[in-house]
Image (spheres, grey):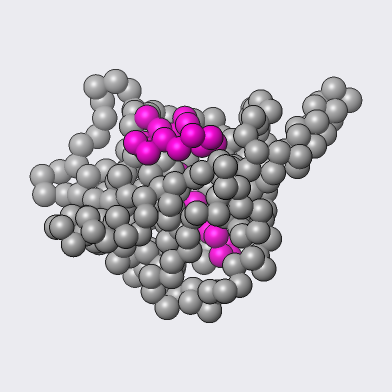
């Protein structure tokens, strides 16, 4: 893990392939009539840094928006990650330990056809769905109205949507989970309507995971000073 060059962005400093990538020519394909598989870049089974309560967080692989200053450029490419069915990914959720699932990326709405069945399974289990997107909600609704059923279905299965591209000139130091002031919170179901108007009361969090092989994964939020202090302390601990 190297020092992070960006001021305050989505923090997910894990290696790009937390799961083994499929061997060349050996990728799974869905059966005839089945939804496409989800290209998963990373999973954190339990986190309190990626939305309300304790959550199962999924970073998908692939994004064509490519915001300048994005902290996850390793998730831009549509190659890599692990292909999983909605049922396979759902089976990994520790349902008794989490309040819901958060979809990040990458760009979840560029895999809407694969993620919508997964999100429906999550809601049917009584859990919530929070989705991040670099698109604006209005854009997604226009796509849905124009006949994009996958986008419509993923919106229907999302309780809380964070929309808008990251703009590094508009850093947001007040609200949790978002990186810039242009990004919006949208409660698409009654699930989190009680939180409207009180987003700034939720503190930012940063989670550090050290694997047995010494790799360090970071998720959550922190500004440049906090990250500099963190990595300086980690270097001192390693050298000491």
- In the rendered view of the protein, which quadrant contains the C terminus? top right
- Residue lying furthest left in this view? 32
Q: Is residue 67 magenta?
A: yes
Q: Residue 100 in the image: x percent, y percent? A: 48, 63
Q: Is residue 172 above or below residue 30?
A: below
Q: Residue at x 62, y 34 (%)?
A: 6
- In the rendered view of the protein, which quadrant contains the N terminus? top right
| Residue 92 in view in this figure | no
Q: Residue at x 57, y 74 (%)?
A: 197
Q: Quarter-wise, where is residue 146 in the image?
A: bottom left
Q: Residue at x 43, y 66 (%)?
A: 186
Q: Residue 71 in the image: x percent, y percent? A: 54, 36
Principal secondary structure, stretch drawn in magenta: loop
Quick check: 205 left or right of 98?
right
Q: Is residue 74 magenta?
A: yes
Q: Residue 128 in the image: x percent, y percent? A: 44, 67
Q: Which residues are magenta?
A: 50-77
Q: Quarter-wise, where is residue 41 in the image?
A: top left
Q: Residue 120 in the image: x percent, y percent? A: 31, 64
- Residue lying furthest right in this view? 240
| Residue 79 in view in this figure | yes
Quick check: 94 left or right of 149?
right
Q: Residue at x 53, y 79 (%)?
A: 194
Q: Give the mark count.
A: 0
């Amino acid at each position: 893990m190297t020092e992070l060059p960006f001021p305050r962005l989505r923090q997910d400093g894990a290696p790009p392939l937390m799961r083994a990538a499929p061997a060349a020519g050996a990728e799974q394909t869905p059966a005839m009539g089945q939804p496409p598989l989800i290209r998963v870049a990373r999973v954190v089974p339990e986190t309190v840094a990626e939305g309300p309560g304790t959550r199962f967080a999924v970073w998908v692989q692939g994004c064509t928006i490519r915001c300048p200053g994005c902290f996850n450029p390793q998730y831009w490419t549509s190659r890599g990650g692990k292909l999983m069915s909605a049922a396979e990914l759902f089976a990994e959720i520790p349902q008794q330990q989490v309040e819901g699932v958060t979809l990040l990326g990458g760009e979840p709405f560029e895999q809407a056809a694969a993620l919508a069945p997964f999100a429906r399974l999550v809601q049917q289990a009584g859990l919530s769905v929070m989705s991040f997107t670099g698109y604006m909600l209005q854009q997604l609704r226009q796509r849905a109205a124009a006949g994009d059923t996958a986008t419509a279905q993923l919106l229907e299965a999302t309780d809380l949507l964070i929309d808008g591209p990251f703009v590094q000139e508009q850093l947001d130091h007040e609200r949790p989970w978002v990186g810039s002031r242009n990004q919006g919170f949208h409660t698409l179901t009654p699930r989190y309507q009680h939180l409207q108007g009180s987003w700034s009361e939720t503190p930012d969090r940063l989670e550090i995971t050290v694997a047995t092989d010494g790799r360090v994964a970071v998720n959550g939020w922190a500004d440049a000073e906090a990250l500099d202090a963190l990595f300086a302390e980690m270097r001192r601990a390693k050298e000491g």
